[in-house]
Amino acid sequence: MKKKLSGLSDIRRYFHRNDTPYWFVSATPFNLLGIDEWVRRWSYVNLIDCFDGHHPRALVPPRDQDRVFESIEEITNYLLRHKQVVDGIEANGGGKAVFLFFDEETESICDELGLQVCFPKAKLRQEIDNKVVTTRIGNEAGVPSVPNTLGKVTGYESLVAMAKKAGIGTDLVVQTAFGDSGHTTFFIASEQDYAKYAEEIEAEPEVKVMKRIRCKGAALEACVTQQGTIVGPLMTELVGFEELTPYRGGWCGNEVNAEAFPLKVREQARDYTFKFGEALRKRGYRGYFEVDYLTDLDADELYLGEVNPRVTGASSMTNLAAFAHADAPLFLFHLLEFADVEFELDVQDLNRRWSDPENIDDWGQLVIKFTKDEIQHVKKAPASGIYELMPDGSLQYVRMQTHRRTAERENRAFFLRIVGEGDYFYEGADLGILVSRGRLMTEDFQLNERGRAWTRGIRALYHGEPLVKTQAEQVASRIADAGGFKML
């Protein structure tokens, strides 16, 4: 019988001495960068070689470059079936599997490979990921959403009638149950606006129709454990900046900054997240989740946006923050929930400590996409690693690095490349993620000059060539088949 773990010291030691292989299988290592420094025998299994073979814990099997993937779940299942990956898992005696996205097929493959999936069942995750269901869970837990109504929309008149009955006006935001907010959130103030999205909205059995508010976004990650819900710091969200993304309402980065929100908002967000986590626990969910919040700039109210029952694009920010290095990354508590060991932990004390501004350092990340409506062949791409922003606005490559920690000054940043030489630029393609100390937004939540300078500098390191018409048509067809699929 294994000894019961008592407190953070025991928990850290347990993972540093871990003998069970862990496999993070996803398109890139981005979401859980740095966890390999906390968990012995941790490996990344990826489709994209972001580090050009230099990451010591990354397995990137060779692949057919013409293969089209329509989702990250499909990538996950492809990697798990790849002979080189299967051979590696079998040679190490199986182990435990971690994913960004997975489905019931993934669970079946893992059963065949002798891998334990370190998440609740895919069916439960999908149910919670539904924005309509999320709204109802929030209502039950006492976590309010922007004034809204839920239901089937059959046309513009139907939409207006629903909104009128709910008393939310005619300047509306409509969200479908699933999908990227940049693609499945529709801003509608007229019948002309509605016509652009009518087919997508009317295809849904139920949508969320909200009053449009003037707001800023925030994100907070947490973990449901048997001892209670552990809550991370409130982060700002960068949304819809044209320098970074072609999608209105599309997520394009985060900041960790203790003073970005008033104390009242920070405390309310933590309270709401704890309540939501406890509501998830009653439904049998355990482990990592993330909540997006909307702060109403006119009514000074905090509202539930959506919930992601998984690690997210903000997870590396949470898990590499100063408070995480002082105690343990939030994701370690997720792994602990799926470990064959008993533990005790003072969740209330941990949450108190993680809410203290003194324990939160300032970091920001930019998710940089290709914003032009055209297709190009990538001829030159920057390496992942540490870069320095020079006085003339150019970037200088300093050294190879596998995560952000050695970017010690605000004129240095860590860049993780996604699109590489030989790939294609297309509207919405993820070029990469840049992470730097300090703020990337102004006090009124606009992209600041420093953020714009880093973005310009990274774009200048890429070079693409337009395709001839026939090539462009072929690539455009492949992208359309994949639904404009993104890697993050």
Image (spheres, rainbow, N blue to C red):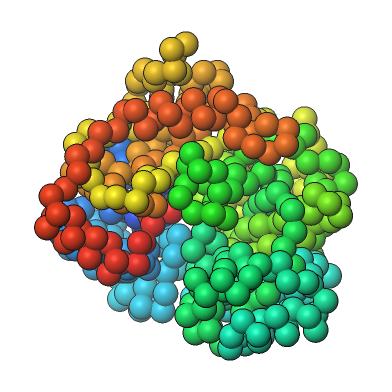
Residue 40 in the figure: left or right of residue 464: right
The residue located at (42%, 69%) in the rendering is: 102
Query: Is 139 above or below relative to 41?
Result: below
The residue located at (66%, 76%) in the rendering is: 208
Query: Is 264 above or below relative to 159?
Result: above
Q: Quadrant of the N terminus?
A: bottom right
Q: Quadrant of residue 25?
A: bottom left
Q: Residue furthest top?
A: 391
The percent position of residue 110, horizontal first and vertical second, equals 35, 72
Residue 382 in the figure: left or right of residue 32: left
Q: Quadrant of residue 286?
A: bottom right
Residue 214 in the figure: left or right of residue 105: right
The percent position of residue 223, horizontal first and vertical second, equals 65, 58
The residue located at (63%, 46%) in the rendering is: 237
Query: Is 50 above or below relative to 305?
Result: above
Q: Nearer the viewer, residue 286 or 183?
A: 183
The percent position of residue 133, horizontal first and vertical second, equals 65, 78
Counting every numbered tag in the picture gives 0
The residue located at (39%, 18%) in the rendering is: 394
The percent position of residue 226, horizontal first and vertical second, equals 70, 65
Q: Nearer the viewer, residue 49 or 87?
A: 49
Q: Quadrant of the C terminus?
A: bottom left
Q: Quadrant of residue 389?
A: top left
> Is residue 384 something that shows in the picture?
yes
Residue 174 in the figure: left or right of residue 180: right
Q: Nearer the viewer, residue 363 or 342?
A: 363
Q: Nearer the viewer, residue 3 or 13?
A: 13
